[in-house]
Image (tube, grey):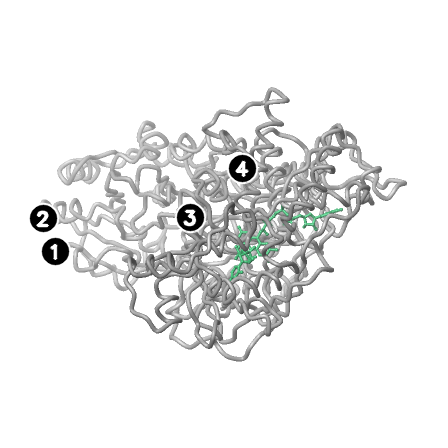
């Protein structure tokens, strides 16, 4: 896959390669990317990623690579049946391999379509450019995700270029660094048309007068108008060049005076235009054309052809008002304007006016203008990164940081994002692990399967605000968690439901029957205090022993009677057949995994992330005004009152040479005879297609990373002492599962962090409007 060209890095300048993502095919050459990128390719290696093609089934995903005019064009080939999520994953992997093979370290990312962010949003870049040529969301067949993806791209882009003035007006409020860059023209290329006499064979036999158009023939063209015009003036010949896309070819008007000559190469175009009497741009005035700025306008003019166009805003503004293009409405209007042109002797000075108008419109000048903007942002970034050599290892930046945040799990990442984006604070986020994401971290294992390094994490919440907040950083894969327990030789649903009882006891109870069954067995104590009480009250001792006693002893290292009731109260009992593990309103998995979601959260110039670093190594060296601490609270105070007990886990991750292992993502093994508590098969959670499968066994243990605060009365009392101490430390806030010693789910930690952000904003008098601030009204449980 390696491509021969000047090695990246040797090329002086702001980046070592330009990676461009496009919805257009390179071989449809008369487009803006072609003009800009062939010029840029004189100074940089340029890689142009097209949308994937889907060849025959059974092919492994790969990249087709070819060279065109100095640009390396790359077409991903994916299996036809691949899902949208699978296609994104495959492209991401192919892209990563390609970048690694090319040794690209400092790419400039250049987007023509925001949709490509779906598989490239993890890439670091010296700068990110969004070259917005069209309002793609208005095009036929546009993905409903486009507006959301565009928002994400706008949030990370350093510069936004718009293809025309009306698009500029529409987008100028959306980004701080927007520039209108209307399309230019290769005057010399098209000017040649004025002197061409030899006709291409397929056009030579078409009589005059000829009206010509080239471009994609799709919903932007007013097909009805063309049909009417051909009927209105059967003596005029209409020549159409270009591919038919998205619309049914059967819908095209087929009068004998309409000639579809198909797509032609860029080099051939002047030869065709030379033979037209009038160039026409019969665009429909619809959503799809509201913001277009057709490159062909100056090209037709450079070729010396008079032009008649529909009232496209940018054409009217740039050319119509200056008398360079005639604007017409409907078939009759076109006929009238074309008639006028055909009837008049060409004004001597007309071509002079055209040449004067086109003089400033060279692609070279446009390209230089764009690069000047890009250099500016790249240098500004470089300046922010390139700190001059300093005598001390952790020499601070001039002003230090507003916040030092310890821990890059949910608590730390949410606060970093809010403080940086919501309040403009400068944040240093530190984690002693080699990755972000805390316990929710996921990554591809050696077999290429996405696994959760610290056990299965399933997102569920009843809070729309929390769900909406996280949705800013990820798309979701709908997923409802269902778990089976292996009990007495049966695989039955847990939480216990009607199916569980009927299968386990060989019964055929109705919901009412099950209620009576449980009522008979229930052993309610006077007060429900412990995890044992909760289950005995709900289902009695037989089911308690089968499902809860062994599991809980293994999981927590103590008997359920020692644990607070809240632990087993997490698991409901149902008398119907609902076998979902959670009853929450929102249940889903981040479509591209948790780590990707965290990367998106932390991708902000005010956030610096330092991994493999315990905060104690650097806290004295890096000036900061405030600290947010999300690690274990007892460790922060050097275990002054003794260690708080945490339960840990050892994971055995295994990849099997078979496509699947078990019927559900998680199977629980409550029996005390089995040393692990559960087995997870990750492909159920992620939806990944792979010929192998990866699973993990969980072995609870006392020693190791602190995963679970253990909710017993003694531990709660010990934590209280630390909490009181924590309240006396000025400038440090404690948040998250370990720092507040709470058995919290992810959504609860997000809620807790958002509530703390709200509190900090209030303290600083920086209260955001509730519209923008997802933390509004969120109490910390
Ligand atoms: P963490 O994710 O633990 O992050 C704290 C970070 O601080 C860590 O990365 C740590 O390395 C870092 N740190 C600590 N001390 C220091 C230091 N001195 N210097 C630098 N860095 C430091 N929740 C759900 O909602 N659904 C689930 O399905 C689910 N499953 C789970 C399964 C398992 C096995 C476990 C253990 C938890 C599960 N959770 C689940 C809970 C979820 O993991 C937590 O709610 C969430 O990850 C807590 O986020 P946090 O930021 O508080 O802590
Ligand atoms: N539990 C159990 N048997 C099961 C499932 C859960 O005894 O099959 C108990 C156990 O004490 C566990 C608690 O219920 O720790 C909460 O389970 P949950 O699945 O919510 O725990 P998580 O692993 O998500 O923290």
Instruction: Give the residue at mark 3.
Output: 584
Alpha-carbon span between mark 4 and mark 3: 16 Å
- Give the crowd class for mark 4: few <14, some 14-19, many >=20 residues within 10 Å: few
Q: Look at 52% across and 54% down and name the residue there.
A: 568
Location of the C terminus by quadrant is top right
* Nearer to us: label 4 or label 2: 4
The residue furthest right is: 391
| Residue tagged 4 | 781
Q: Quadrant of the N terminus?
A: bottom right
Please state the horizontal and vertical placement of residue 564, each as a whole percent of the image.
Answer: 59, 48
Q: CA distance from mark 2 to mark 3?
A: 63 Å
Task: Name the N-terminal-most of marks 4 and 1.
Answer: 1
**In the figure, residue 340 lies in which quadrant?**
top left
Q: Is residue 716 above or below residue 725?
A: below
Q: CA distance from mark 4 to mark 1?
A: 72 Å
Nearest to viewer (mark 1 / mark 3):
3
């Amino acid at each position: 896959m390696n491509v021969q060209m000047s090695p990246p890095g040797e090329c002086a300048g702001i980046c070592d390669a330009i990676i461009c993502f496009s919805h257009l095919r390179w071989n449809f050459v008369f487009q803006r990317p072609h003009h800009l990128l062939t010029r840029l390719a004189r100074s940089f290696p340029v890689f142009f990623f097209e949308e994937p093609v889907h060849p025959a089934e059974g092919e492994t995903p790969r990249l087709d690579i070819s060279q065109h005019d100095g640009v390396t064009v790359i077409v991903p080939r994916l299996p036809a049946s691949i899902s949208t999520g699978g296609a994104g994953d495959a492209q991401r992997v192919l892209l990563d391999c390609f970048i690694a093979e090319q040794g690209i370290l400092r790419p400039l990312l250049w987007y023509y379509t925001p949709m490509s962010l779906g598989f490239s949003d993890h890439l670091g870049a010296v700068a990110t450019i969004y070259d917005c040529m069209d309002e793609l969301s208005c095009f036929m067949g546009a993905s409903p995700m486009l507006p959301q993806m565009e928002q994400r791209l706008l949030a990370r882009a350093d510069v936004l270029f718009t293809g025309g003035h009306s698009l500029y007006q529409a987008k100028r409020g959306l980004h701080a660094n927007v520039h209108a860059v209307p399309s230019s023209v290769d005057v010399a290329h098209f000017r040649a048309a004025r002197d061409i006499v030899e006709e291409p064979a397929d056009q030579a036999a078409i009589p005059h007068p000829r009206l010509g158009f080239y471009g994609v023939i799709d919903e932007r063209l007013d097909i009805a108008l063309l049909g009417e015009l051909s009927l209105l003036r059967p003596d005029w010949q209409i020549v159409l060049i270009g591919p038919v896309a998205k619309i049914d070819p059967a819908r095209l008007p087929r009068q004998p005076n309409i000639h579809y000559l198909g797509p032609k190469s860029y080099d051939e175009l002047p030869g065709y235009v030379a033979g037209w009497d009038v160039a026409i741009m019969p665009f429909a005035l619809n959503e799809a054309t509201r913001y277009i700025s057709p490159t062909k306008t100056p090209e037709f003019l450079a070729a010396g052809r008079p032009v008649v166009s529909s009232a496209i805003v940018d054409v009217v503004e740039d050319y119509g008002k200056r008398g360079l293009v005639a604007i017409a409405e409907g078939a009759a209007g076109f006929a009238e304007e074309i008639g006028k042109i055909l009837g008049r002797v060409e004004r001597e000075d007309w071509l002079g006016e055209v040449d004067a108008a086109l003089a400033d419109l060279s692609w070279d000048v446009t390209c230089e203008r764009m690069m000047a903007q890009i250099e500016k942002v790249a240098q500004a970034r470089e300046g922010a990164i390139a700190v001059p050599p300093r005598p001390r290892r952790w020499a601070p930046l001039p002003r230090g940081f507003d916040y030092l945040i310890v821990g890059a799990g949910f608590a730390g990442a949410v606060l970093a994002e809010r403080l940086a984006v919501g309040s403009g604070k400068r944040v240093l986020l530190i984690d002693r692990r080699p990755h972000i994401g805390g316990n929710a971290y996921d990554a591809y294992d050696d077999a290429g399967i996405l696994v959760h390094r610290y056990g299965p994490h399933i997102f569920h919440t009843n809070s729309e605000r929390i769900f909406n907040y996280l949705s800013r950083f990820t798309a979701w894969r709908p997923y409802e968690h269902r778990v089976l327990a292996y009990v007495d030789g049966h695989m039955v649903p847990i939480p216990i439901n009607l199916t569980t009882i009927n299968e386990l006891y060989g019964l055929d109870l109705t919901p009412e029957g099950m209620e009576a069954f449980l009522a008979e067995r229930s052993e309610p104590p006077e007060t429900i205090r412990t995890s044992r009480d909760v289950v005995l009250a709900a289902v009695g001792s037989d089911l308690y022993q089968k499902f809860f006693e062994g599991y809980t002893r293994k999981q927590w290292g103590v008997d359920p009677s020692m644990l607070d009731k809240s632990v087993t109260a997490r698991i409901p009992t149902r008398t119907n057949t609902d076998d979902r593990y959670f009853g929450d309103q929102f249940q889903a998995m981040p479509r591209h995994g948790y780590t990707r979601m965290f990367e998106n959260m932390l991708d902000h110039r005010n956030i610096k992330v330092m991994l493999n670093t315990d905060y104690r190594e650097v806290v004295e060296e890096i000036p900061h005004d405030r600290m947010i601490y999300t690690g274990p609270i007892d460790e922060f105070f050097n275990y002054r009152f003794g260690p708080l007990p945490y339960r840990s886990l050892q994971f055995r991750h295994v990849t099997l040479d078979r496509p699947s292992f078990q019927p559900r993502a998680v199977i629980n093994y409550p029996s005390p005879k089995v040393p692990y508590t559960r087995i997870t098969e990750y492909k159920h959670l992620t939806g990944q297609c792979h010929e192998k499968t990866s699973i993990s066994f969980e072995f609870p243990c006392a020693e190791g990373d602190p995963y679970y605060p253990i909710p017993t009365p003694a531990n709660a009392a010990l934590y209280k002492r630390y909490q009181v101490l924590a309240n006396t430390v000025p400038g440090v806030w404690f948040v998250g599962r370990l720092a507040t010693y709470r058995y919290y789910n992810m959504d609860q930690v997000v809620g807790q962090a958002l509530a703390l952000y709200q509190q900090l904003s209030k303290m600083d008098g920086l209260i955001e409007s509730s519209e923008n601030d997802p933390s509004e009204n969120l109490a910390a449980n």
